[in-house]
Image (spheres, coloured by chain):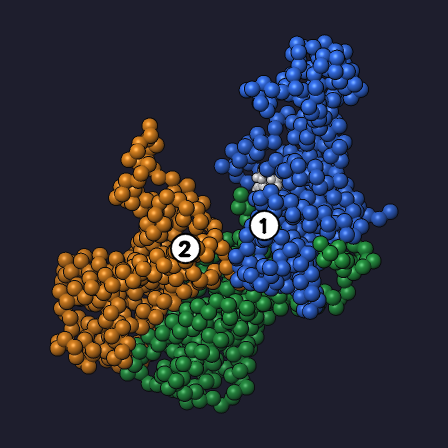
């Protein structure tokens, strides 16, 4: 059996800090298969970067073992470094005085590409990430989005088997983040076996990109699974969002139906002031109950303007697991840092 | 990091105060300035650290003077010996000049490259210029101690004759303050330059100061220079500052401006300038230097804003 | 998108084969890394020409100031040559302080250090690359100082052994930049304090190295400098070889002995730099100090 792309066993990492040591990772176990797109999702300070640093051979674990494609992160550093690369959000690496092309070429040298091969690789990647117009522009003059595309190109220079992405879309606007995500997905899809470990604290990003996700908080992995699996855990009932032209007798008429757990008028619905439509959240015991609800509505003469099943989000999963929201966690982390 | 010192030590107004919101000219300026001086002090001139004190106020300035003293010794002879007080005092004053000039420029480089703070300092309402000058002034304190220690070493160890009773104090104070102004102006000029240049500009301010060293008459009289270079020296406020401090500390001692065959003597008909002439020349050249420096800084600042230079890092 | 999809380097090779490099591949990567790191420095030379003014012309004027000190006291002409040679070598020394010793700390705050460590080359390649780029920079400067000084002050050299002089020069560079490599690792560990140590290496070291005068004049202190500071050793050897006609004060060793000292310095410093890097990497990985956290 070929080795796992990532195999982490009982990793613990403690930073010595004032006033007290910080336990950044605690008894973490993780298995990622070759070819997986794996996400670490967690609030600031959860320990995501720490885990990436350990896997990229930049940091030693305080206890436990970690392997990348079977190579030990403590002993086989050189081998790991040959087949991996990493890109972090907000990265300012390189030298502002160089052009995009020159900067990327410089990095090809650190991976031992012959001079001419290096230039060819650089030009291919520049085109692929869409920086052709900026290729002879100085690095110091790039916008944040362009800069991050260049950083991604840098991360692909050595054609890594495993790519570590540490909050790669941090600080990017919506469209720049989207185009970066598309690049990442395309790159991964092009060759089977390419593996990505991505950290993020954007739920939607993890949901969209990852085959599997580990939810981390306070240095512990709380749950691992595909986005759907994780969401199913919190989804015990079916929730629908229903829009009607009118509803005689109000929500009470629906609650009386068998199988309806609750029905409540949604706050802040469109046209609430003029009362032209009625919007409500409907919680049913399962999807099958929906037929009876629709039938009942038809009998009262209400016209259904819209019906949408509300999916639970990873946010719901996180709240369920941790007992608090993501934003609160970030605020807490910020309070600690300040 | 000592950055928390930027929060001004003023209690927040209990209710909204329009005068404060609009900015209160001179009061705001003074407050910003005071905070900047304190910030500079904490960042650069931490005198509670004996090692830093030793490096900046003892080792560097005294070594500079010793280099010159040994040069005179190597040649020996009466002309060399007679020259020693001149050289020691000039070198001491010069180390003060360098710390003042480098101070402002280092603030720019340091904030940009190390703390990545420049863009934040810049967008804060406190006037950027005030912050810079304030931090530069803090470094001047270090330079002042260095100059004093070098002179003391000169007097005690190297036999430089010095009579505290004969010091012309009014001249000293006048010239010192006017000169400080000029030094800050030259520092500002360098700050304007390094905004435009790249990360490895650490040596630029000292290089510029080194070039002024040639024309300021710090360690040899201007008279030995080619006439054209002498003229440049006469237009530099630092030359007059050094001449003035020399004259105040050692009244009637050998001067650096004039002398036999000098441009000054040729133009004005007497060998050395008197105290009044020095003060007037210092004021005039200082004013020109200030105007020039502010202009350069403003132009550089505007260009930097347009080109987004404040938040770039530019090493190689 | 086509670019990324087509970009299947080493087609058909799995991660294990890709991680298995030959000796030659390893060596070539180290050599190319030297080239890669030197590259931005050489490019930077042409790109931001302000250095011509600030690193050649203005320092030349500062050197000229010392020439006029000698002129003011009527010193013989060869002392002007001493000053000029000192000024030229200072170019390398300043480069070692600002662009070697202080560099790694800056690279760390920039995030480059991490990427260098995460790449497969030996970190010594980075140091060599920095040094070679720096040497290109400062050689330009030193040559210009010598040339202008020759023209303006009429400095004439009297050399008997050109080959030896050239050899001493190259050895001096090797020893200087070797020291720079050691300092780079050391300063990285010291962090921001190191910047102040860099200041300690300017005027005080100039003085004990005999910047503008024969270091022999400093007696025992001078001998110590020749034994331990490559700037002093190289300067003294080059002065002896470049001004054979000068009435040289006795007291410092023969140039050949100084060649031996420089060789030892070079070897020791490169070994020390290697050892320090390995130690530093291990410690930094243990303590989590390869990067500065800005957030
Ligand atoms: N070098 C360090 N020294 C001390 N504490 C650290 C260091 N790096 C990270 N930490 C602490 O470890 C915890 C995890 O940090 P990190 O791995 O960066 O989290 P994340 O990437 O999930 O935001 C945080 O509490 C952080 O403050
Ligand atoms: Mg992180």
Mark 1, secondary structure of its residue: helix
Identify whether B241 is placed above or below A186: below
Q: Which one is nearer the viewer's eye here, A194 or C60? A: A194
Q: Which mark is residue B108?
A: 2
Report how many numbered discs are placed on residues in the image.
2
The quarter of the displayed image where residue B64 is located: bottom left
Mark 1–mark 2 distance (CA, rounded to whole Å): 27 Å
Could you say where residue C135 lies in the image, as x and y percent from the top left?
53, 72
Determine contact: label 1, label 2, CB under 8 Å. Answer: no
The quarter of the displayed image where residue A244 is located: top right
The reply to whether label 1 and label 2 mark residues of one chain is no
Q: Residue at x 43, y 87 (%)?
A: C157
Q: Residue at x 84, y 48 (%)?
A: A2
Q: Which one is nearer the viewer's eye here, B174 or C266? A: B174
Could you say where residue C19 lies in the image, as x and y percent from the top left?
76, 57
| Chain B display color | orange
Disc 1 crowd, CA 10 A, few/some/many (<14, 14-19, 20+): many
- Res. A107 in view: yes
| Chain C display color | green
Q: Is mark 2 within 8 Å of ligand 1?
A: no
Q: Which mark is residue A145?
A: 1
Horizontally, is B108 left or right of B28 in the view?
right
Mark whose residue sits in front, 1 or 2: 1
Q: Chain of mark 1?
A: A
Horizontally, is C216 left or right of B29 in the view?
right
Question: Quarter of the image containing the N terminus of chain B?
Answer: top left
Could you say where residue A98 lies in the image, as x and y percent from the top left?
56, 63
Q: Residue at x 41, y 65 (%)?
A: B204
Identify whether A141 is placed above or below C222: above
- Give the residue furthest to the right: A1
Mark 2, secondary structure of its residue: helix
| Chain A display color | blue
């Amino acid at each position: 059996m070929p080795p796992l792309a990532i195999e982490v066993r009982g990793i613990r990492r403690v930073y010595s800090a004032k006033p007290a040591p910080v336990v950044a990772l605690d008894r973490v176990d993780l298995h990622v298969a070759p070819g997986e797109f794996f996400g670490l999702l967690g609030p600031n300070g959860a320990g995501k970067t720490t885990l990436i640093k350990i896997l990229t051979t930049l940091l030693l674990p305080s206890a436990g073992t970690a392997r990348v494609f079977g190579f030990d992160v403590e002993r086989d550093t050189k081998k790991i470094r040959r087949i991996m690369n990493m890109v972090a959000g907000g990265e300012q690496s390189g030298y502002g005085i160089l052009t995009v092309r020159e900067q990327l070429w410089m990095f090809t040298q650190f991976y031992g590409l012959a001079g001419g091969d290096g230039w060819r690789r650089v030009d291919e990647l520049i085109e692929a990430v869409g920086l052709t117009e900026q290729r002879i522009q100085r690095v110091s003059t790039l916008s944040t989005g362009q800069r991050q595309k260049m950083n991604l190109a840098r991360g692909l220079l050595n054609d890594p088997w495993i790519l570590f992405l540490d909050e790669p879309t941090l600080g990017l606007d919506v469209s720049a983040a989207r185009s970066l995500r598309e690049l990442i997905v395309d790159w991964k899809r092009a060759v089977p076996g390419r593996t990505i470990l991505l950290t993020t604290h954007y739920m939607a990003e993890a949901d969209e990109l990852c085959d599997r996700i580990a939810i981390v908080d306070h240095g512990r992995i709380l749950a691992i699974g595909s986005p759907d699996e994780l969401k199913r855990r919190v989804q015990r009932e079916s929730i629908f969002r229903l829009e009607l032209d009118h509803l005689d007798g109000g929500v009470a008429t629906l609650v009386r139906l068998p199988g309806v757990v609750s029905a409540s008028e949604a706050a802040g619905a469109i046209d609430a002031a003029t009362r032209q439509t009625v919007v409500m959240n409907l919680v049913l015991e399962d999807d099958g109950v929906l037929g009876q609800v629709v039938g009942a509505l038809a009998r009262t003469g209400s016209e259904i303007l819209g019906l949408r099943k509300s999916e639970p989000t990873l946010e719901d999963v996180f709240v369920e697991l941790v007992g608090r929201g993501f934003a609160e966690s970030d605020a807490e982390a910020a309070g600690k840092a300040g | 990091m000592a950055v928390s010192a930027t929060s001004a030590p003023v209690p927040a107004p209990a209710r909204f105060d329009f005068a404060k919101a609009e900015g209160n000219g001179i009061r705001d300026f003074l407050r910003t300035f005071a905070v900047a001086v304190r910030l500079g002090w904490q960042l650069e001139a931490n005198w509670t650290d004996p090692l830093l004190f030793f490096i900046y106020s003892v080792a560097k300035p005294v070594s500079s003077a010793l280099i010159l003293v040994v040069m005179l010794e190597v040649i020996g002879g009466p002309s060399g010996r007679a020259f020693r007080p001149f050289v020691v005092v000039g070198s001491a004053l010069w180390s003060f000049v360098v710390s003042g000039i480098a101070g402002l420029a280092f603030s720019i480089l340091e904030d940009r490259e190390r703390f990545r703070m420049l863009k934040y300092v810049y967008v804060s309402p406190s006037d950027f210029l005030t912050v810079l000058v304030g931090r530069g002034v803090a470094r001047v304190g270090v330079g002042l101690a260095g100059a004093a220690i070098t002179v003391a070493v000169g007097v005690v160890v190297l036999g430089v004759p010095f009579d505290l009773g004969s010091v012309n104090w009014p001249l000293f104070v006048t010239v010192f303050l006017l000169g400080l102004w000029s030094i800050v102006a030259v520092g500002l000029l360098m700050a304007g330059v390094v905004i435009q240049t790249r990360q490895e500009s650490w040596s630029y301010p000292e290089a510029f100061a080194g070039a002024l060293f040639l024309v300021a008459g710090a360690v040899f009289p201007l008279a030995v220079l080619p006439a054209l270079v002498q003229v440049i020296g006469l237009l530099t406020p630092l030359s007059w500052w050094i001449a003035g401090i020399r004259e105040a500390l050692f009244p009637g001692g050998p001067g650096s401006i004039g002398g036999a065959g000098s441009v000054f003597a040729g133009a004005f008909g007497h060998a050395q300038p008197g105290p009044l002439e020095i003060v007037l020349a210092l004021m005039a050249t200082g004013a020109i230097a200030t105007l020039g420096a502010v202009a350069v800084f403003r132009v550089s600042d505007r260009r930097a804003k347009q080109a987004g230079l404040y938040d770039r890092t530019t090493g190689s | 998108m086509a670019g990324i999809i087509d970009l299947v380097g080493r087609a058909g090779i799995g991660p294990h084969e890709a991680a298995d490099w030959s000796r030659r591949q390893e060596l070539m990567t180290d050599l190319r890394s030297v080239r890669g790191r030197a590259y931005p420095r050489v490019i930077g030379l042409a790109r931001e020409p302000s250095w011509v003014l600030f690193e050649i012309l203005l320092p030349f004027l500062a050197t000229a100031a010392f020439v006029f000190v000698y002129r003011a006291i009527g010193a013989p002409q060869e002392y002007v040559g001493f000053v000029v040679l000192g000024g030229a070598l200072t170019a390398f020394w300043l480069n070692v302080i600002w662009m070697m010793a202080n560099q790694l700390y800056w690279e760390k705050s920039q995030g480059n250090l991490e990427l260098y460590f995460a790449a497969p080359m030996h970190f010594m390649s980075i140091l060599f690359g920095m040094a070679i780029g720096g040497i290109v920079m400062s050689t330009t400067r030193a040559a210009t100082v010598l040339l202008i000084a020759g023209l303006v002050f009429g400095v004439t050299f009297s050399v008997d052994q050109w080959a030896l002089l050239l050899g001493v020069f190259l050895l001096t560079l090797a020893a200087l930049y070797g020291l720079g490599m050691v300092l780079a690792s050391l300063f990285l560990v010291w962090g921001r304090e190191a910047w102040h140590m860099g200041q300690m290496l300017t005027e005080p070291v100039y003085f004990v190295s005999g910047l503008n005068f024969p270091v022999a004049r400093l007696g025992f202190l001078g001998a110590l400098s020749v034994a331990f500071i490559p700037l002093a050793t190289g300067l003294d050897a080059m002065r002896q070889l470049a001004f054979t006609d000068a009435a040289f004060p006795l007291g410092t060793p023969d140039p050949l002995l100084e060649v031996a000292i420089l060789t030892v310095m070079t070897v020791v410093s490169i070994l020390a730099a290697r050892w320090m890097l390995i130690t530093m990497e291990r410690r930094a990985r243990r303590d989590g100090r390869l990067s500065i956290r800005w957030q």
